Amino acid sequence: MISLRRLPNQERDESPILFLRRHWTEVAKIVLLLIILSAVVYVIYYFLSENGADWSGYMGQFSSLLLSIYAFFVLAVLLSMFSDYYLDTWIVTTNRIINIEQRGLFSRVISELHLNQVQDVTAETRGFLQTILSYGDVYIQTAGARERFIFKTVNDPEIVKQKITDLVAKDKRRHGDASK
């Protein structure tokens, strides 16, 4: 876990400004999926019981085995989705932007971008739900090897964009423009 007091390769005059995760609606989607996938089992059980299924003997044991396997896979998929949500983070400091992206359970990519490499910052809010709940994507166009950083479904993308733009302007006044 990354501590905000001590970041990897932290410079002496560097301090964290923003610590971002995806919006809570991403967790709501996972919970909704869990409810739907769990309801499938109960619907099947009810349907079979109403049509005279015999749950004793081998059929009951086989059904229990199938239910256990199904529950295991549902929980494994949901765990993977939640870890992807929870471990995808973006940290904006006074000198750089750190993108920590979880890809599956056992793969993570950490990228960093110095503020003097930022060329453009764009905030995008799409659709009714994102507009009402004030979340969306922030795109950071760079002059480096990785052309674009994407902050997916973060809270208040316009505010995030403005803070990053202000930090970039301060950094360019302090160190000069390296994006040219």
Image (spheres, rainbow, N blue to C red):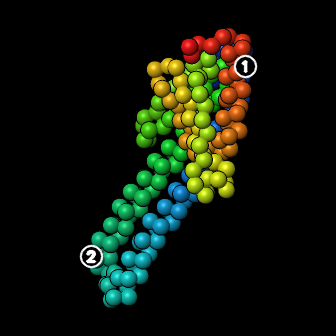
* Mark 2 vs 1: CB contact within 8 A: no
Callout 2: 10 Å neighbours few (<14), some, many (20+)?
Answer: few
Amino acid under disc 1? Lys
Q: Is residue 80 above or below residue 45?
A: above
Q: In the displayed structure, does residue 47 sit left or right of residue 83? A: left
Q: Which residue is the site of mark 2? A: 58
Q: Nearer the viewer, residue 22 or 128?
A: 128
For marks 2 and 1, give the CA distance.
72 Å
Q: Is residue 25 above or below residue 168?
A: below
Q: Pinpoint residue 27: horizontal percent, then vertical percent.
A: 57, 53
Amino acid under disc 2? Tyr
Q: Nearer the viewer, residue 130 or 81?
A: 130
Callout 1: 10 Å neighbours few (<14), some, many (20+)?
Answer: some
Q: In the displayed structure, does residue 47 sit left or right of residue 134? A: left
Question: Which residue is found at the position 53% from the left and 24% from the top?
Answer: 142
Comes first in the chain, label 2 or label 1 = 2
Q: Pinpoint residue 160: horizontal percent, then vertical percent.
A: 68, 36
Question: Which residue is found at the position 37% from the left and 63% from the top?
Answer: 70
Q: Nearer the viewer, mark 2 or mark 1?
A: 1
Q: Pinpoint residue 149: horizontal percent, then vertical percent.
A: 53, 31
Q: Pinpoint residue 13: horizontal percent, then vertical percent.
A: 72, 15
Query: Which quadrant, please, contains the C terminus?
Result: top right
Q: In the displayed structure, does residue 78 sit left or right of residue 7? A: left
Q: Is residue 151 above or below residue 175?
A: below
Q: Which residue is the site of mark 1? A: 170
Query: Which quadrant, please, contains the N terminus?
Result: top right
Question: Which residue is found at the position 67% from the left and 29% from the top?
Answer: 164
* SS state under label 1: helix
